[in-house]
Amino acid sequence: MFFVYFALIITAGLFISVVHPLSLGRIWKLLLTLLILLMAGRLAILREIFGGLGGVECDRRLLLATSFLQNLAIFLFALAILRDLVYVLCLPFHFLAPVKEGALAFRHFLKGAHFTLILVFLSAILSGWSLHEATKIPDVKKSEVVLDKLPPELDGLKVALLADTHISRFYDRDWVNAVVERTNALDPDIILIPGDLVDGETRLRAGDVEPLSRLKSRYGKFFCVGNHEYISRLPDWMPVFQNLGLRNLYNLNVPVNLRGTVLYLAGVTDQAAYSRNLPGPDLRAALKGVPRDAPVILLEHRPSNAKENAQDGRVSLQISGHTHGGLFPILKTITKKANRGYLKGFYEVGSMKLYVHPGTGLWSGMPARILDPSEITLLTLRSPR
Protein backbone atom coordinates (compact mmCIF):
# COMPACT_ATOMS: atom_id res chain seq x y z
CA MET A 1 0.00 0.00 0.00
CA PHE A 2 2.97 2.33 0.52
CA PHE A 3 3.50 2.51 -3.25
CA VAL A 4 -0.16 3.48 -3.74
CA TYR A 5 -0.03 6.20 -1.08
CA PHE A 6 3.20 7.51 -2.61
CA ALA A 7 1.55 7.79 -6.04
CA LEU A 8 -1.55 9.48 -4.64
CA ILE A 9 0.48 12.09 -2.72
CA ILE A 10 2.58 12.96 -5.79
CA THR A 11 -0.53 13.10 -8.02
CA ALA A 12 -2.57 15.21 -5.60
CA GLY A 13 0.31 17.63 -5.08
CA LEU A 14 0.92 18.11 -8.79
CA PHE A 15 -2.80 18.48 -9.52
CA ILE A 16 -3.14 21.27 -6.95
CA SER A 17 0.12 23.03 -7.77
CA VAL A 18 0.59 22.44 -11.51
CA VAL A 19 -2.46 21.08 -13.33
CA HIS A 20 -5.35 22.98 -11.73
CA PRO A 21 -3.94 26.52 -12.36
CA LEU A 22 -3.50 25.80 -16.10
CA SER A 23 -5.94 27.38 -18.55
CA LEU A 24 -7.18 24.07 -19.88
CA GLY A 25 -10.53 22.34 -20.15
CA ARG A 26 -11.62 19.75 -17.62
CA ILE A 27 -10.96 16.85 -19.99
CA TRP A 28 -7.35 17.91 -20.56
CA LYS A 29 -6.79 18.43 -16.85
CA LEU A 30 -8.24 14.99 -16.17
CA LEU A 31 -5.97 13.41 -18.79
CA LEU A 32 -2.90 15.19 -17.39
CA THR A 33 -3.78 14.06 -13.88
CA LEU A 34 -4.22 10.48 -15.06
CA LEU A 35 -0.83 10.62 -16.81
CA ILE A 36 0.82 11.88 -13.62
CA LEU A 37 -0.87 9.11 -11.64
CA LEU A 38 0.54 6.50 -14.04
CA MET A 39 4.02 8.03 -13.80
CA ALA A 40 3.98 8.29 -10.03
CA GLY A 41 2.32 4.90 -9.66
CA ARG A 42 5.06 3.06 -11.55
CA LEU A 43 6.03 0.89 -8.57
CA ALA A 44 2.50 -0.25 -7.80
CA ILE A 45 1.64 -0.87 -11.46
CA LEU A 46 4.79 -2.83 -12.33
CA ARG A 47 4.53 -4.88 -9.16
CA GLU A 48 0.94 -5.81 -9.97
CA ILE A 49 1.76 -6.80 -13.57
CA PHE A 50 5.24 -8.34 -13.33
CA GLY A 51 5.70 -9.18 -9.65
CA GLY A 52 8.75 -8.60 -7.52
CA LEU A 53 9.41 -5.57 -5.36
CA GLY A 54 8.63 -2.63 -7.61
CA GLY A 55 8.18 -4.75 -10.73
CA VAL A 56 11.77 -5.89 -10.62
CA GLU A 57 11.10 -8.73 -13.09
CA CYS A 58 9.92 -6.71 -16.08
CA ASP A 59 12.05 -6.02 -19.16
CA ARG A 60 15.05 -3.76 -18.47
CA ARG A 61 14.08 -1.30 -21.22
CA LEU A 62 10.64 -0.91 -19.68
CA LEU A 63 12.26 -0.46 -16.26
CA LEU A 64 14.46 2.34 -17.61
CA ALA A 65 11.62 4.09 -19.50
CA THR A 66 9.25 4.00 -16.55
CA SER A 67 12.06 5.02 -14.19
CA PHE A 68 12.59 8.17 -16.26
CA LEU A 69 8.87 9.02 -16.05
CA GLN A 70 8.68 8.31 -12.33
CA ASN A 71 11.76 10.46 -11.64
CA LEU A 72 10.27 13.24 -13.76
CA ALA A 73 7.11 13.22 -11.64
CA ILE A 74 9.11 13.25 -8.40
CA PHE A 75 11.38 16.11 -9.46
CA LEU A 76 8.44 18.09 -10.83
CA PHE A 77 6.69 17.62 -7.48
CA ALA A 78 9.78 18.90 -5.63
CA LEU A 79 10.26 21.88 -7.96
CA ALA A 80 6.56 22.75 -7.75
CA ILE A 81 6.80 22.83 -3.94
CA LEU A 82 9.85 25.08 -4.21
CA ARG A 83 7.99 27.33 -6.68
CA ASP A 84 4.99 27.56 -4.33
CA LEU A 85 7.28 28.42 -1.43
CA VAL A 86 8.77 31.31 -3.41
CA TYR A 87 5.24 32.36 -4.36
CA VAL A 88 4.21 32.56 -0.69
CA LEU A 89 7.41 34.39 0.30
CA CYS A 90 6.64 37.02 -2.33
CA LEU A 91 3.17 37.65 -0.89
CA PRO A 92 4.22 40.47 1.53
CA PHE A 93 5.62 42.48 -1.39
CA HIS A 94 2.10 42.59 -2.81
CA PHE A 95 1.24 45.16 -0.13
CA LEU A 96 4.29 47.40 -0.60
CA ALA A 97 3.42 50.24 -2.95
CA PRO A 98 6.90 50.77 -4.48
CA VAL A 99 7.17 47.16 -5.64
CA LYS A 100 3.52 46.13 -5.76
CA GLU A 101 3.23 46.06 -9.56
CA GLY A 102 6.46 44.11 -10.06
CA ALA A 103 5.58 41.64 -7.28
CA LEU A 104 2.19 40.96 -8.86
CA ALA A 105 3.77 40.37 -12.28
CA PHE A 106 6.38 38.03 -10.82
CA ARG A 107 3.76 36.00 -8.91
CA HIS A 108 1.61 35.70 -12.05
CA PHE A 109 4.71 34.51 -13.94
CA LEU A 110 5.43 31.86 -11.30
CA LYS A 111 1.93 30.42 -11.68
CA GLY A 112 1.80 30.85 -15.47
CA ALA A 113 1.94 28.17 -18.14
CA HIS A 114 5.37 29.29 -19.40
CA PHE A 115 6.99 28.81 -16.01
CA THR A 116 5.26 25.43 -15.67
CA LEU A 117 6.86 24.37 -18.95
CA ILE A 118 10.22 25.48 -17.59
CA LEU A 119 9.66 23.30 -14.52
CA VAL A 120 8.75 20.30 -16.69
CA PHE A 121 11.88 20.86 -18.81
CA LEU A 122 14.11 21.09 -15.73
CA SER A 123 12.48 18.00 -14.27
CA ALA A 124 13.18 16.05 -17.47
CA ILE A 125 16.85 17.09 -17.36
CA LEU A 126 17.14 16.09 -13.69
CA SER A 127 15.37 12.80 -14.38
CA GLY A 128 17.71 11.86 -17.22
CA TRP A 129 20.82 12.93 -15.32
CA SER A 130 19.82 11.11 -12.14
CA LEU A 131 18.97 7.93 -14.05
CA HIS A 132 22.33 8.00 -15.84
CA GLU A 133 24.16 8.41 -12.53
CA ALA A 134 22.15 5.55 -11.03
CA THR A 135 22.85 3.05 -13.82
CA LYS A 136 26.49 3.75 -14.73
CA ILE A 137 29.40 1.52 -13.75
CA PRO A 138 30.62 2.92 -10.42
CA ASP A 139 33.96 4.65 -10.11
CA VAL A 140 36.56 3.55 -7.58
CA LYS A 141 36.99 5.58 -4.40
CA LYS A 142 40.15 5.01 -2.37
CA SER A 143 40.38 5.84 1.33
CA GLU A 144 42.56 5.03 4.33
CA VAL A 145 41.45 4.32 7.88
CA VAL A 146 43.55 4.02 11.04
CA LEU A 147 42.40 1.26 13.41
CA ASP A 148 43.69 1.42 16.99
CA LYS A 149 43.95 -2.35 17.39
CA LEU A 150 45.46 -3.10 13.99
CA PRO A 151 48.92 -4.66 14.40
CA PRO A 152 51.82 -3.29 12.32
CA GLU A 153 51.90 -6.55 10.33
CA LEU A 154 48.52 -5.66 8.80
CA ASP A 155 49.37 -2.07 7.93
CA GLY A 156 48.50 -1.47 4.28
CA LEU A 157 45.91 -4.27 4.04
CA LYS A 158 43.60 -3.54 1.10
CA VAL A 159 39.88 -4.15 1.56
CA ALA A 160 37.45 -3.77 -1.36
CA LEU A 161 33.86 -2.89 -0.50
CA LEU A 162 30.77 -3.54 -2.63
CA ALA A 163 27.46 -2.56 -1.07
CA ASP A 164 23.84 -2.62 -2.22
CA THR A 165 24.49 -4.11 -5.64
CA HIS A 166 20.79 -5.09 -5.91
CA ILE A 167 21.52 -7.44 -8.79
CA SER A 168 18.35 -7.69 -10.88
CA ARG A 169 17.12 -6.99 -14.39
CA PHE A 170 18.05 -3.37 -13.68
CA TYR A 171 21.61 -4.25 -12.67
CA ASP A 172 22.05 -7.27 -14.89
CA ARG A 173 24.87 -9.64 -15.82
CA ASP A 174 26.71 -7.11 -18.01
CA TRP A 175 26.73 -4.55 -15.20
CA VAL A 176 27.88 -7.17 -12.66
CA ASN A 177 30.67 -8.29 -15.01
CA ALA A 178 31.95 -4.72 -15.27
CA VAL A 179 31.84 -4.28 -11.48
CA VAL A 180 33.72 -7.56 -10.96
CA GLU A 181 36.42 -6.58 -13.47
CA ARG A 182 36.87 -3.15 -11.88
CA THR A 183 37.07 -4.68 -8.40
CA ASN A 184 39.56 -7.38 -9.40
CA ALA A 185 41.78 -4.71 -10.98
CA LEU A 186 42.27 -3.26 -7.48
CA ASP A 187 44.05 -6.48 -6.41
CA PRO A 188 42.36 -6.50 -2.97
CA ASP A 189 43.42 -8.63 -0.02
CA ILE A 190 39.81 -9.03 1.17
CA ILE A 191 36.41 -8.28 -0.37
CA LEU A 192 33.53 -7.31 1.94
CA ILE A 193 29.87 -6.88 0.96
CA PRO A 194 27.50 -5.42 3.61
CA GLY A 195 24.22 -6.75 2.24
CA ASP A 196 21.57 -6.25 -0.44
CA LEU A 197 23.36 -8.24 -3.10
CA VAL A 198 20.23 -9.34 -4.95
CA ASP A 199 16.64 -8.55 -5.85
CA GLY A 200 14.54 -11.44 -7.07
CA GLU A 201 14.28 -15.22 -6.90
CA THR A 202 17.21 -17.56 -7.41
CA ARG A 203 15.79 -19.09 -10.60
CA LEU A 204 15.53 -15.65 -12.19
CA ARG A 205 18.89 -14.27 -11.01
CA ALA A 206 21.17 -17.27 -11.60
CA GLY A 207 22.79 -15.84 -14.71
CA ASP A 208 23.04 -12.31 -13.33
CA VAL A 209 24.86 -13.27 -10.11
CA GLU A 210 27.24 -15.78 -11.73
CA PRO A 211 30.03 -13.20 -12.34
CA LEU A 212 30.37 -12.81 -8.54
CA SER A 213 32.11 -16.20 -8.57
CA ARG A 214 35.00 -14.51 -10.41
CA LEU A 215 35.65 -11.92 -7.69
CA LYS A 216 39.27 -12.42 -6.60
CA SER A 217 41.04 -11.56 -3.36
CA ARG A 218 43.94 -13.09 -1.46
CA TYR A 219 42.07 -13.97 1.72
CA GLY A 220 38.47 -14.41 0.65
CA LYS A 221 35.19 -12.61 0.01
CA PHE A 222 32.68 -12.15 2.83
CA PHE A 223 29.23 -10.65 3.19
CA CYS A 224 26.34 -10.11 5.57
CA VAL A 225 22.69 -10.25 4.58
CA GLY A 226 20.59 -7.12 4.04
CA ASN A 227 16.84 -6.55 4.10
CA HIS A 228 16.49 -7.30 0.38
CA GLU A 229 17.92 -10.80 0.83
CA TYR A 230 14.93 -11.53 3.08
CA ILE A 231 12.52 -10.01 0.57
CA SER A 232 14.13 -12.26 -2.07
CA ARG A 233 13.68 -15.47 0.00
CA LEU A 234 16.97 -15.72 1.87
CA PRO A 235 16.81 -19.50 2.58
CA ASP A 236 16.80 -20.17 -1.17
CA TRP A 237 19.81 -17.89 -1.67
CA MET A 238 22.06 -19.36 1.05
CA PRO A 239 23.38 -22.30 -1.03
CA VAL A 240 23.73 -20.03 -4.07
CA PHE A 241 25.95 -17.62 -2.15
CA GLN A 242 28.04 -20.54 -0.96
CA ASN A 243 28.48 -21.82 -4.53
CA LEU A 244 29.61 -18.33 -5.57
CA GLY A 245 32.40 -18.53 -3.01
CA LEU A 246 30.87 -15.89 -0.73
CA ARG A 247 31.26 -16.52 3.00
CA ASN A 248 28.10 -15.47 4.84
CA LEU A 249 28.82 -13.88 8.22
CA TYR A 250 25.46 -14.91 9.67
CA ASN A 251 25.75 -13.83 13.34
CA LEU A 252 29.23 -15.30 13.44
CA ASN A 253 32.90 -14.45 12.98
CA VAL A 254 35.75 -15.84 10.92
CA PRO A 255 39.40 -15.52 11.97
CA VAL A 256 41.51 -14.67 8.95
CA ASN A 257 45.15 -15.66 9.36
CA LEU A 258 47.36 -13.35 7.39
CA ARG A 259 50.91 -12.03 7.60
CA GLY A 260 51.55 -13.97 10.79
CA THR A 261 48.64 -12.47 12.73
CA VAL A 262 44.83 -12.70 12.90
CA LEU A 263 42.09 -10.33 11.77
CA TYR A 264 38.54 -11.19 12.79
CA LEU A 265 35.69 -10.61 10.34
CA ALA A 266 32.27 -10.65 11.98
CA GLY A 267 28.77 -10.10 10.68
CA VAL A 268 25.18 -9.92 11.86
CA THR A 269 21.84 -10.46 10.18
CA ASP A 270 19.30 -7.74 9.39
CA GLN A 271 16.24 -6.51 11.31
CA ALA A 272 14.05 -7.77 8.46
CA ALA A 273 14.62 -11.25 9.87
CA TYR A 274 12.20 -10.61 12.73
CA SER A 275 9.17 -10.43 10.42
CA ARG A 276 10.11 -13.80 8.89
CA ASN A 277 10.79 -15.70 12.11
CA LEU A 278 14.51 -15.94 11.32
CA PRO A 279 17.44 -15.03 13.61
CA GLY A 280 17.80 -11.27 14.05
CA PRO A 281 21.10 -9.40 14.48
CA ASP A 282 23.03 -10.77 17.45
CA LEU A 283 26.35 -9.04 18.12
CA ARG A 284 27.15 -11.24 21.11
CA ALA A 285 26.91 -14.36 18.96
CA ALA A 286 28.87 -12.69 16.17
CA LEU A 287 31.78 -11.92 18.53
CA LYS A 288 31.77 -15.24 20.36
CA GLY A 289 35.32 -16.48 20.91
CA VAL A 290 36.99 -13.28 19.69
CA PRO A 291 39.80 -12.07 22.03
CA ARG A 292 39.07 -8.62 23.45
CA ASP A 293 42.32 -7.13 22.14
CA ALA A 294 41.94 -8.52 18.61
CA PRO A 295 41.12 -6.27 15.62
CA VAL A 296 37.53 -6.84 14.47
CA ILE A 297 35.76 -5.66 11.32
CA LEU A 298 31.99 -5.97 11.65
CA LEU A 299 29.56 -6.12 8.74
CA GLU A 300 26.02 -4.92 9.47
CA HIS A 301 23.79 -3.83 6.62
CA ARG A 302 22.16 -0.91 8.44
CA PRO A 303 24.33 1.66 10.23
CA SER A 304 21.67 2.54 12.81
CA ASN A 305 23.02 0.16 15.49
CA ALA A 306 26.53 1.64 15.42
CA LYS A 307 26.36 3.16 18.93
CA GLU A 308 25.28 -0.15 20.46
CA ASN A 309 27.95 -2.04 18.50
CA ALA A 310 30.63 0.36 19.73
CA GLN A 311 29.69 0.25 23.42
CA ASP A 312 32.12 -2.38 24.70
CA GLY A 313 34.99 -1.32 22.43
CA ARG A 314 35.47 -4.73 20.83
CA VAL A 315 34.68 -3.68 17.23
CA SER A 316 37.41 -1.68 15.47
CA LEU A 317 35.54 -0.93 12.24
CA GLN A 318 31.91 -1.34 11.20
CA ILE A 319 31.04 -1.49 7.50
CA SER A 320 27.43 -0.71 6.54
CA GLY A 321 25.35 0.28 3.53
CA HIS A 322 21.56 0.57 3.19
CA THR A 323 21.31 4.38 2.95
CA HIS A 324 22.48 4.63 -0.69
CA GLY A 325 24.00 7.94 0.45
CA GLY A 326 20.59 9.64 0.39
CA LEU A 327 20.39 9.62 -3.46
CA PHE A 328 19.64 13.33 -3.93
CA PRO A 329 19.56 16.51 -1.80
CA ILE A 330 15.88 16.55 -0.81
CA LEU A 331 15.95 12.94 0.32
CA LYS A 332 19.26 13.12 2.21
CA THR A 333 17.79 14.75 5.34
CA ILE A 334 15.03 12.15 5.60
CA THR A 335 17.45 9.26 5.03
CA LYS A 336 19.89 10.60 7.60
CA LYS A 337 17.21 10.90 10.29
CA ALA A 338 15.86 7.45 9.49
CA ASN A 339 19.34 6.01 10.10
CA ARG A 340 20.05 7.82 13.38
CA GLY A 341 22.28 10.47 11.82
CA TYR A 342 24.40 8.22 9.60
CA LEU A 343 24.30 8.86 5.86
CA LYS A 344 27.61 8.05 4.12
CA GLY A 345 31.35 8.12 4.69
CA PHE A 346 33.35 7.81 7.90
CA TYR A 347 32.09 8.40 11.44
CA GLU A 348 33.78 8.17 14.82
CA VAL A 349 31.48 6.21 17.16
CA GLY A 350 33.26 5.97 20.49
CA SER A 351 36.46 4.04 19.85
CA MET A 352 34.93 2.41 16.76
CA LYS A 353 35.18 3.67 13.18
CA LEU A 354 32.05 3.41 11.02
CA TYR A 355 32.04 3.51 7.24
CA VAL A 356 28.65 3.88 5.56
CA HIS A 357 28.96 2.88 1.92
CA PRO A 358 26.81 4.96 -0.49
CA GLY A 359 26.12 1.89 -2.59
CA THR A 360 27.56 0.24 -5.68
CA GLY A 361 24.06 -0.05 -7.14
CA LEU A 362 20.64 0.73 -5.69
CA TRP A 363 17.09 -0.52 -5.56
CA SER A 364 15.39 -0.16 -8.96
CA GLY A 365 12.29 1.25 -7.27
CA MET A 366 14.04 4.61 -6.76
CA PRO A 367 16.70 4.76 -9.50
CA ALA A 368 18.01 8.30 -9.08
CA ARG A 369 21.32 9.80 -7.98
CA ILE A 370 22.22 13.47 -7.98
CA LEU A 371 25.51 14.67 -6.47
CA ASP A 372 25.73 11.30 -4.74
CA PRO A 373 27.69 8.89 -6.98
CA SER A 374 27.79 5.14 -6.54
CA GLU A 375 31.18 3.65 -5.81
CA ILE A 376 33.45 0.66 -5.51
CA THR A 377 35.50 1.40 -2.40
CA LEU A 378 39.07 0.41 -1.66
CA LEU A 379 39.93 0.87 2.00
CA THR A 380 43.57 0.69 3.05
CA LEU A 381 43.86 -0.25 6.72
CA ARG A 382 46.53 1.55 8.72
CA SER A 383 48.06 0.69 12.06
CA PRO A 384 48.61 3.54 14.53
CA ARG A 385 52.09 2.19 15.26
Image (spheres, grey):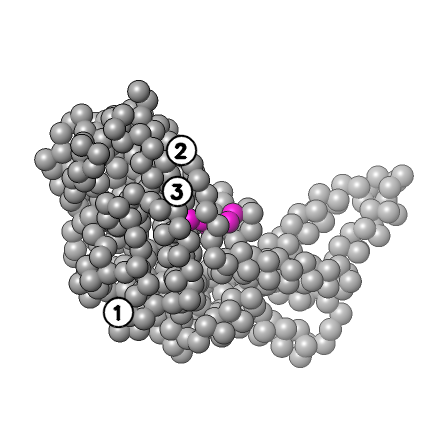
Distance from label 1 to label 2 (Cα)? 36 Å
**Left or right of 106, for residue 187:** left
> Magenta residues?
372-376
Residue drawn at the location 51% of the way across and 47% of the way down: 372
- Provide the secondary structure element on which disc 3 rests: strand
Going by the numbered disc 1, the residue's amino acid type is Thr
Distance from label 1 to label 3 (Cα)? 29 Å
Mark 3, other Cα within 10 Å: few <14 / some 14–19 / many ≥20: many
Which residue is the site of mark 2?
144
- Provide the secondary structure element on which disc 2 rests: strand
Distance from label 3 to label 2 (Cα)? 8 Å
Residue drawn at the location 38% of the way across and 67% of the way down: 173
Ranked by sequence position, the earlier of labels 3 and 2 is: 2
Which residue is the site of mark 3?
378
Instruction: Establish if 87 lies above or below 310.
Output: below
- The reply to whether dot 1 and dot 2 touch (C-beta < 8 Å) is no
- Residue sitting farthest toward the top: 385
**Left or right of 73, for residue 259:** left
Residue situated in front as seen by the camera: 81 or 281: 281
Instruction: Establish if 250 lies above or below 41.
Output: above
Which residue is the site of mark 1?
202
Residue 236 at x, y percent in the picture: 20, 66
Q: Is residue 375 magenta?
A: yes
Ranked by sequence position, the earlier of labels 1 and 2 is: 2
Residue drawn at the location 75% of the way across and 55% of the way down: 110
Mark 1, mark 3: which one is toward the viewer? 3
Going by the numbered disc 3, the residue's amino acid type is Leu
- Provide the secondary structure element on which disc 1 rests: helix
